[in-house]
Amino acid sequence: MYQPAIPVSGYSGWKFLQSTYSRQLENFADTATVKNDRDYLTSKLSEPISKEDFLDDRRLLRIAMTSFDLGGEEWKRGYIDKVLEEVNDPDSTFLARLNNTAYTAFAETFAPNEDEMISLSEAQLSVLADNYETAAFKLAVGEVDGNMRLSLNYQSRIADIVGTASSDNAILYRMLGDVPIRTVLEGALNLPSEFSKLDLDQQAGILKDKLSSQLGINDLQTLTDPARIDRMLERFHVMETVRNGTVDSLTPGATALTLLGNMGSSASQNLFLSMFY
């Protein structure tokens, strides 16, 4: 199986991955495993399939869910069945309460008709197959470096999280409910582990305050700006470098970071950030 090339961790590793992303994704998609999965997806969904057959085909379900960045959750058959049932009920608030954009998109794509059949158009199937390649590549990246996968997920999902929400509170709750988004934000903003134990409303308030005080973000819609995304991921990797004590030459303020590395406290982290941000 193709293994993505990430020669170093931290910010320099992220920059390398970004600069080689297109070529590496192309090479990954050209492997036999990925081609076979794509062909299997296409052959199985080129004609209508019953909901039960879809749910019972573990390989098909794995590929389909991976296309929505839900890879690894295919074992939740009963839960997935519930999602597909609720999406067709106009009175159901299940998906709204779930507040997970990936599951909502999955449910809307595979919503069965009144005969419990799932039908996809040729255009939908093509998009699904392309999304599978990209999402499977993220999984492969994560096997090499988990922080790189988190960064790719943040980069690709933040627009969906922010863009479909109706208010600041809705955006905050969605970000807190999405594991990759939340993890990147907690790391970039240097939030303590105790943060997750607070009441959700308190978490939302603190997150909004930290985005404003540390990054000057008062309009949450601007989180989708490419420059904002780059800055957030830079901060995330810098903070991970501080926590892990590993410095590379492309890390902003590498010399200062090396001097502070042995301090091993939140004070050194805050001092470093005050110097460069």
Image: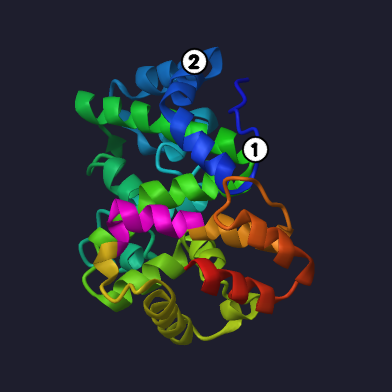
Q: Is residue 121 visible?
A: no
Q: At 29% across and 76% down in the image, what residue appears?
A: 218
Outermost residue on the right side: it is 262
For the magenta stretch, what is the residue range? 223-234
Residue 69 drawn in magenta: no
The residue that label 2 is drawn on is 36
Dot 1 lies on which element? helix
Dot 2 lies on which element? helix
* Residue 277 on image: x %, y %: 47, 68
* Residue 244 on image: x %, y %: 72, 58
Q: Crowdedness of circle 2 by 10 Å Cα count: few (<14), some, many (20+)?
A: few
Q: Taking 44 as reference, is 250 left or right?
A: right
- 213 or 121: nearer the viewer: 213
**What color scheme is it?**
rainbow
What is the quadrant of the N terminus in the image?
top right
Q: At 61% across and 48% down in the image, what residue appears?
A: 10
Outermost residue on the front side: it is 255
The residue that label 1 is drawn on is 143
- 261 or 6: nearer the viewer: 261
Instruction: Tell me: residue 189, above or below residue 55.
Output: below
- Give the amino acid type for the residue marked by disc 1 in the picture: Glu
Q: Is residue 228 visible?
A: yes
Instruction: Tell me: residue 260, above or below residue 244.
Output: below
Residue 230 drawn in magenta: yes
Q: At 40% across and 82% down in the image, what residue appears?
A: 209
- Give the amino acid type for the residue marked by disc 2 in the picture: Asn
